[in-house]
Amino acid sequence: MSLAQQAIREVAAAHEFFNRSTRGLTESHSAYAPEAGMMTTAAMVAHTAQTIKWLVEGAFRPEGFDMDFEGAAAKTNACTSLAEARAWFEKAVASTKEVLATKSDADLMTPLPEGPIMGGMPRMAIIGAMTDHTAHHRGALTVYARMNKIVPPMPYMEM
């Protein structure tokens, strides 16, 4: 199995786990945040999607990672619809799989530029960062669900 195939499988698993864990949240939960100043449900899903795209773009474009975190947060915080955020997430995952399918093992083992974001690590390292980040936010979203009296399903098996 090529590194690209392996990466696509990992992205697919993270995608499935995220969707299973968060499927109890509905459009009516879009604006929910446990406290003022925290990300809403819609914004957190949008942020997760945005980060997937950010990692892929940063790994493969000549200028590297976009470091405008304030601008990125403004875009995700402006997302007020969970349906819109989920569509963004689905598009980010599909696009990631398409990009990865075009990469050779050599492409994926090419070191990232030196710098604050995984500097010098192979491009393939973005997959671990992507799955960790997605898991982090699906975990937070399961807390949001529980605070709304929704019991999230076990993410690793279909129920």
Image (tube, helix red, strand yellow):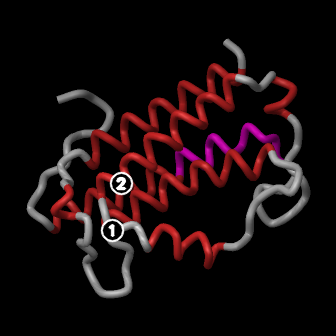
Residue 124 % position (x, y): 73, 37
How would you classify the magenta stretch by its main secondary structure? Answer: helix
Compared with 146, 77 (above or below) is below
Q: Amino acid at mark 2?
A: Glu
Residue 15 in which image quadrant: top left
Residue 70 % position (x, y): 61, 78
Q: Is residue 126 left or right of residue 91?
A: right
Q: Which residue is mark 2?
A: 84
- What secondary structure is marked by label 2? helix
**Residue 130 lies within the magenta run:** yes
Q: Amino acid at mark 1?
A: Thr
Q: Residue at x 61, y 49 (%)?
A: 53
Q: Is residue 95 left or right of residue 64?
A: left
Instruction: Find the magenta span and give its range.
Output: 121-132
Q: Nearer the viewer, residue 156 or 73?
A: 73
Residue 134 % position (x, y): 47, 50
Q: Is residue 7 left or right of residue 113?
A: left
Q: Residue at x 88, y 43 (%)?
A: 111
Q: Residue at x 18, y 49 (%)?
A: 24
Q: Which residue is mark 1?
A: 80
Residue 23 in which image quadrant: top left
Which quadrant holds the N terminus?
A: top right
Q: Looking at this rendering, what residue extends furthest in the left direction?
A: 149
**Callout 1–callout 2 Cβ contact below 8 Å:** yes
Q: Is residue 56 left or right of residue 147?
A: right
Residue 37 % position (x, y): 37, 86
Q: Which mark is residue 116?
A: none
**Residue 124 lies within the magenta run:** yes
- What secondary structure is marked by label 1? loop
